Amino acid sequence: MGLPIRRGNSNPSVRQKRLERGVEILRHSITAIEHLSDTLDEDFLLAVDKICSLKGCLIVTGIGKAGLIGRKLSATFASTGTRSHFLHPAEAVHGDLGSIGPNDIILVLSNSGTTEEIVRLLPHFSRRSAGIIAMTSKCNSPLARAADLILLLPSFREACTHNLAPSTSTASMLVLGDTLALVVSEANGFSKESFAEFHPGGALGKSLSTVDDVMRPLSECRVANSQSSVRDIFVQVAKTGRRTGAVMLIDDHGRLEGIFTDSDLARLMEQRRDGDLDLPIRGLMTTAFTAIHSKANLSDATAIMAHRKISELPVVDEDDRPLGLIDVTDVLGLRHDSPENTNTPSDREDWPDAPISLRLFGIPESFNEHHS
């Protein structure tokens, strides 16, 4: 038996008040962020320009809740093309000031601008770095006076009943920091391909990869000449390890011209066509199939496989020579309904919107020339 769910106070009026309080806190933060969006000014643009022209690192610092937001912002900058690391103020005075270089810019987060651990570092920051950008709600604070640029936060009460727990201020810091990071990233021309380089791990990394990163190389695939017989092929091209569900058939020039799957073989056996096993596979292979070009996005490949309900997708070069094969078991769990794939065709009339990497075999050449 599982543990009982504890719902706290069951008094309907108390629960309603708590719900209303939750909505009130959310709306308080929304109001602050809306105010922030209305007050972005020239200093924001100057901060974007300064970070875009950065020759060193963007060093982000803050303490307490502002420090936690700073760690997140530093990670966002780093993952979107701006070299960045977080500097803890307490560690800074015990040797980590040495991580600041003359080409670095320091982004300092402090709502009050008077935090003792931050203020005592300001002379060191000014002396050792190429400039200070302050994110604070107090334009006359020691931090603001020491900064080259000020990103002013809305001077709102915290959502906390006692106006003590950082909440509205940290929400504003997070949103403004993310805004700065993304505008800088776009200004620097940071691409989806660049993002993929920084995110090689997990499902996200795979979905941003190219087909070459995931496909089974030719050495692990079953490839044969289309003049060979079915029996000879399945005897000669056996592979150890994970077996792909298709044999890729090539002509005398090494170009892919058909595929023959395990399902095709099973159909021959079910139909008691044993004699066909000794015929050239060219007459039995599937010639109307889909392949994808090398360097194409893996997200395109998964979308094609899902749409066409296929388990194997050959990868070919510009001359239609096979380079490898993507098996559905290699990409299980990857989403194919991301925004980038909303134009995946749903029927033949929609093929003009197909990814340019798509290669269709077994249909008129003029169509392929236009779409591949």
Image (tube, grey):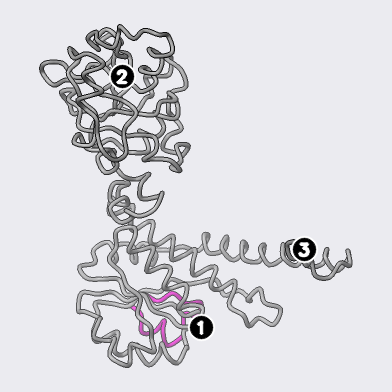
Along the polypeptide, which appears first: circle 1 or circle 2? Answer: 1
Along the line of sight, which residue is nearer the eye, 282 or 143?
282
Which corner quadrant of the image does residue 277 belong to? top left
**Callout 2 secondary element:** strand
Question: At x 43% / y 71%, what residue is drawn?
Answer: 151
Which corner quadrant of the image does residue 128 belong to? bottom left
* Relative to 100, residue 120 above or below: below
- Amino acid under label 2? Phe
Q: Give the label, 3 or 1, closer to the camera.
A: 3
Tag of residue 123: none
**CA gap, disc 3 to disc 1?**
30 Å
Q: Which residue is mark 2?
A: 260
**Callout 1 secondary element:** loop
Report the quarter where the N terminus lies.
bottom right
Q: Position of residue 241 (x, y in %)?
A: 29, 40
* Relative to 356, residue 8 above or below: below
**CA gap, disc 1 to disc 2?**
69 Å
- Amino acid under label 1? Ser
Q: Which residue is mark 3?
A: 19
**Callout 3 secondary element:** helix
Q: Position of residue 82 (x, y in %)?
A: 29, 63
Along the polypeptide, which appears first: circle 3 or circle 1? Answer: 3
Q: Position of residue 332 (x, y in %)?
A: 43, 40
Query: How many marks overall?
Result: 3
**Segment tinted magenta in the rendering:** 133-148
Q: Which residue is mark 1?
A: 112
Question: At x 48% / y 37%, what residue is drawn?
Answer: 337
